[in-house]
Image (cartoon, helix red, strand yellow):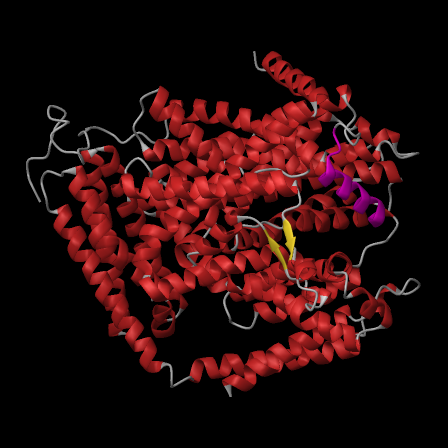
Amino acid sequence: MRLTGHVLMWGGFLVGAFYSLSYLEVADNKWSTVPWGKYFAGIGLGIVGVVLLRVTGQKLEGDEESHEAKFSVLCENLSEVISSVSEMASQKNHDPAKVLNQIDNECAEPLSEFANARQALVRRFGMSVYAEVMTEFASAERYINRCWSAAADGYVDEIRDCLQKADTHLAKTDALIAAAEKL
Amino acid sequence: MSDTPPTMDNPDSDPGFIPIRTGPYPEFTWTAVLVGWAIGALIAVSIGYAALILGFAIEGSELAAILGWGILRGVLRRSSIVENNINQTIASAVNGASSGIMFSVPALFILSRREGLEAVADFNVPLMILACITGCVLGLAFVIPLRKQMIDFDRLAYPGGIAVATILKSPGAGVRKAVLLLGGALLSGVVHLLVLSLMGEDHDWKANSQFEWLPEMLNITIYLSVMTVGVGFLSGKGGFWFGAGGFLCYFLLSPLLSQFGSDGVAAMVDTPDDMRGVLYKPLGIGMLVGAAVGGIIAAFPLIASAMKAMHNASKSSDSDSKNDEMPIGLLYAAIGIGALVLVWIAFASVDGMTLGRAISMALLGTLWVWVAGVVVAECIGRTNWSPLSGMTLIAVTILIVIAKGGLNTVETITSSMLVGAAICLAISQASDMMLDLKSGYLVGGIPRRQQLAQFIGAWLGPIIVISLMILLNSQYEIGSDRLPAPQAQALASVTEGILDNNIPTYRYTAGAGLGLLLAISGLGGIGVLIALGFYMPFAIALTYTIGNVLRIASDKAFGSKFSHEVGIPIAAGLIVGEALVGVGHAFYKVFFVSPDETETALLGVHFLCGVFG
């Protein structure tokens, strides 16, 4: 079904593109350059394909496992970042070089993996929850990036401030996912 | 983790020692603003002048970041990555005027040399500057609310933004990454120098000519630019469909058209440049518009969520979220006031303008700024290329169609170009803002401060670049052999075509339908990317695809960490090296190859020194 959707959409697109391009400009009647009947037949075929893709996209059972796996990856990586940032935020004094290393070694990859698996949120909870979660996650990531910059420049007050803010945003990210799971 | 960090007293005890500093982290400072204005003015004059001769403008963010790094850290002994980020944001905002203005305004001078059109050069200069500044404000006010959707939610790559962030972060990234960045820059710079010395401005290696068995229609041409490979690497698999669009054109449609197309088209397929100019590019422009409109519809829930988040942040008692984003109400006000000012500008542009026509031009222009802003923000986010010329072309088409109903030819051109220049600047600022916001995200800049910095820089560019342009035109005619202004020549030709009703509107329309179809498919972003594959030269798409394939292979073989640790610094270096050699080459050509023009450039500098004391 999904393959049929792809074939129809791309076939329709190609038919439409072909007829859009198959004639040079007709000087006395420019709009007749494109054979619109055949063009719209292609577009129509493409629309049928898009509808099939949309319908099968919602019902796709085979992908359920991979989405579940992606969601687990996402949760695991979020936990890793939360644990690392919480640990750093709980320190009283910060050695900038160590913070820099810890962010590079413990946060960068889980943050990237979380982002790569983010579509699992759309699939599981829908666009609205996705937007809320990503708002908090992106804020947390930005503060971790800011903490990295502040650490590279040695500003310890800023490091502390950023770690606390990142920690708060990560906790909110986690809470939003947990709340969405309960619904 | 140790509770007793090293201090300023023992800096040599540890090679990885970072001096401890207390107090607020410098970000939006007067130093950053003043240095940003100075670097921006320098880059805008230089790149603007070079653009009039060479025909292309250069994105100034990388150059601004490197100059800022040298001045802020080296000369002024400042020590803040995010402060340099504000500096480069301001500098590139000033420079944003050079690409926007040099593509549009000089067309008026060029058209004024046609018989009967002499009066179009007598446009109101302060009004033109105001129009350009208004365009900057509109472009920024429309694109800022998209930050959340495109950077936070869709996480578009913005390869140029990654390159700038890599430069900004280099003081703390360690020796290894700095070596990789410099190595990439050196490789790219040397290759670019070799290409320039061996092939001149033509960077295309036509593989077809080497392998005669390859059909000409396949257009296998490599754009000899390792920077483009770097951009493809940074875009990763997200940019794959851009190359696919090019392959669709030359590997599928061209062969089909050679067999089943009309005689005229079948005879043309073996000249790929003509195929692009006559068929693929106009269809690509239409597809870009259709895909953008479809994209807005498809992404509406996310856009609505982003807007809702901004509204909530404005009302929130949480000072963090409130201070992170520019108040949405302020942006609405900027759009409203900008549109009203644009109405007044259109009305005051020529004597014969009626209020109704001015309102139509300004409102459609404002609406187009939004659509085009979405298009360029997405294109530059996914591929690093902005279809500025295509979007401006459509803007000018719309404006001329409205204006020519009741105005004479001179008035039509003058009023359309005035409002069109505003739109061109808006699009240019929108793409620069999104690139800078991505850099800011990666270094942890506060978006609100960066957005303010962009506004603070944007107004200066039009004043500098238009002053420079008028001076140059009075000394050496723009459009002459000394200052050919190739981009503006192209716009002038197109403008004449529009006035003669000689534009392929039917192909734009057909393209829009196709773009819309892809955009509603639910396959994220393919509409805009495939459209860009139709619009851009295939050589660039092909070389870009090499970068995509390298990234996919690297991720598969060595994991994403390797790409982040090794691949990204090298790829960023590839962008930086070629950009710097490109700027150097432009200066070399201007100052050493064409001695006459040196005098012109110096006159420009003296003039600006006079204007700004």
Magenta segment boundaries in residue numbering? B483-498
B77 up-or-down from B208: above or below: above
Residue B463 place in picture, x, y as percent:
62, 25
| Residue beneath the point at 44% across and 53% down | B234
Nearest the camera: B499 or B138?
A: B499
Residue toward you, A127 or B425: B425
Q: Establish if B515 lies above or below B385.
A: below
Examine the rendering and report whether any part of residue B335 can be seen: no
**Residue B169 shown left or right of residue B22 in the figure:** right
Check the image and report above or below for A121 versus B190: below
Residue B335 in the image: state x and y as whole percent.
57, 43
Quadrant position of residue B530:
bottom right
Outermost residue, left side: B3
* Relative image position of residue B18 (x, y in whole percent): 19, 32
Q: Main secondary structure of the magenta part?
A: helix
Q: Is residue B575 left or right of residue B27?
A: right
x, y percent for residue A111: 28, 57
Residue B1, picture quadrant? top left
Quarter location, residue B338: top right
